[in-house]
Image: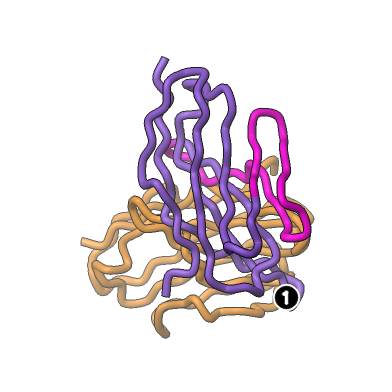
Chain colours: A purple, B orange
Amino acid sequence: QQQVKQSPQSLIVQKGGISIINCAYENTAFDYFPWYQQFPGKGPALLIAIRPDVSEKKEGRFTISFNKSAKQFSLHIMDSQPGDSATYFCAASKRTGGYNKLIFGAGTRLAVHP
Amino acid sequence: GAGVSQSPRYKVTKRGQDVALRCDPISGHVSLYWYRQALGQGPEFLTYFNYEAQQDKSGLPNDRFSAERPEGSISTLTIQRTEQRDSAMYRCASSPDSNYGYTFGSGTRLTVV
């Protein structure tokens, strides 16, 4: 059962534009929602994360928007740059038992054209 | 070390052989996770260690897969009697505790021929 659905599968954005990637989850018990960025040949790297008690979190050009009632969250990349070209994964978890078992989306391949 | 180290980087093995994949987490990280990532997909949870204790192995596909972390540091994921469907990228991740995000290693690309 896929618990985190991510869209789009791929995205092309012009330099300076806004990249938007969306995720939807099913399990209302999830309490941690990170985004990971993965470059070719590398492991996923934590980009930004949010907890359900806030609706938005911003770190530099990256913003997570969270809609608890709709069970959706999204990543916005402002002023997108060619160096942002990578695969982005959303994830979710319910942190119980002292650990953080993440359920990942299928990923979005972002290409930012100069 | 500065990051999570995995070895080997690539492993090609014949069907039916056993393989052992190694993970050296960031020093001091209590939590260690193993994930499997198919091409074009997100990582899929396999197992979790808290120090040396394997506290969740619900993601291991079948009893051919096992993992250990005997001294609470280096971990080994072992796949016995490998099958072609085991071919994937196997990733290890570690974190200081459950309140922090993971640091993933670069992974081991396993190909079963």
Say if residue B59 shows up in the picture.
yes
Front in this rendered view, residue B100 or B80: B100
Of all residues shown, which one is farthest toward the left? B113
The location of residue B32, given as percent across then percent down, is 65, 63
Residue at (52% x, 28% y) in the render: A18
The location of residue B17, given as percent across then percent down, is 30, 71
Q: Which residues are magenta?
A: A40-65
Front in this rendered view, residue A92 or B83: A92
The location of residue B86, given as percent across then percent down, is 32, 67
Q: Which quadrant: the C terminus of chain B?
A: bottom left
Q: Is residue B31 above or below residue B2?
A: below
- The reply, left or right, for residue B29 in relation to residue A64 is right
Residue at (42% x, 55% y) in the render: A106
Of all residues shown, which one is farthest toward the front? A69
Q: Secondary structure at mark 1?
A: loop
Amino acid type for the residue under numbered disc 1: Thr
The location of residue A54, given as percent across then percent down, is 76, 53
State which chain disc 1 sits on: A
Of all residues shown, which one is farthest toward the top? A114
Residue at (64% x, 35% y) in the render: A62
Residue at label 1?
A96
Q: Which image quadrant is residue B52 in? A: bottom right
